[in-house]
Amino acid sequence: TISFNSDYYTTTQGKKKLHAAEAEIQKLINIQHPNLLSTFAVKLNFPYSGAPPRLTILSEQRPVLTLQDVLEDCERLREDRASEYLGQILSALNAVHSADIIHRSLDISCIYLATRENRTHTKMVRMGKVGYHARLKDYHKSNPFGNGISNVNEEEYIRPTPWLSKDVLESVLSYTRGRDIHNIGVIFMQMVNGRDVMRQFSDPNEAVQAAALSPTLRTCALNMLVHAKKVSC
């Protein structure tokens, strides 16, 4: 449950923003996909008592392990493992985009890895922090509501300029499908070149050329990073 401890969120404009967040979460509830963490319920409450508005969200418990954890422990992933994870990430994102939702904050910290029932297989990707997480951080940045929420997608703010999507360069608050796809391209480069790929290579082209990738995957990576094109790898 999130409490909005600011008078702004009792104004007409503030309420409009909270209803927009609730509507987005309602759309998220309707998406059922094996590579996406499920959201089960949402309730927006404006108490008559003068207490602050509250947004209650019931979600599936997140797996403990993230892709960020894995890349902190090993330098990089094998091409076949990275390719398998990439396919699952793209599949989950396609389900999100098909529901007319933008993820907004894709990075390695929101790619969770769950153990399959058959433990001999690789882990299953479970994408989390879809849509409303970044939306609420943006709300907090404009009109703080006292929950100690950090600024949206901090990683994007500290990326070297050549690694930013063109949409971010045009407007930081412009969230597009292309920006989501570009962020998956960055995640893929972190899987095959290491977590610090943006410090090691001056731009995405250089990183793609340095990676030990098949021609098909190299083209796939360039399409995501340079052209922000929807891909199927």
Image: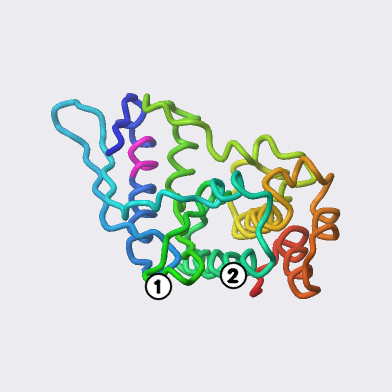
Rendered location of residue 10, percent (x, y): 30, 31
Task: Identify the amino acid type marked 2.
Answer: Glu
> Image point 40% across, 72% down: which residue?
118
Examine the image and state in which quarter residue 44 appears.
top left
Asked whether 16 falls inside the magenta stretch, the response is yes
Prevailing secondary structure class for the magenta stretch in the rendered image: helix
From this view, report whether residue 142 is shown above or below residue 98. Answer: above
The numbered disc on residue 84 is 2
In the current view of this chain or complex, which residue is farthest to the front?
Answer: 120
Give the residues in magenta: 14-18
* Residue lying at the far left of the rendered structure: 49
Q: Nearer the viewer, residue 86 or 133?
A: 86
Mark 1 or mark 2, whichever is nearer to me: 1
For the residues labelled 1 and 2, the Cα–Cα distance comes to 16 Å
Number of the label disc, if any, that sits on residue 118: 1
Q: Residue 93: x, y in percent?
A: 53, 64
Where the C terminus falls, by quadrant? bottom right
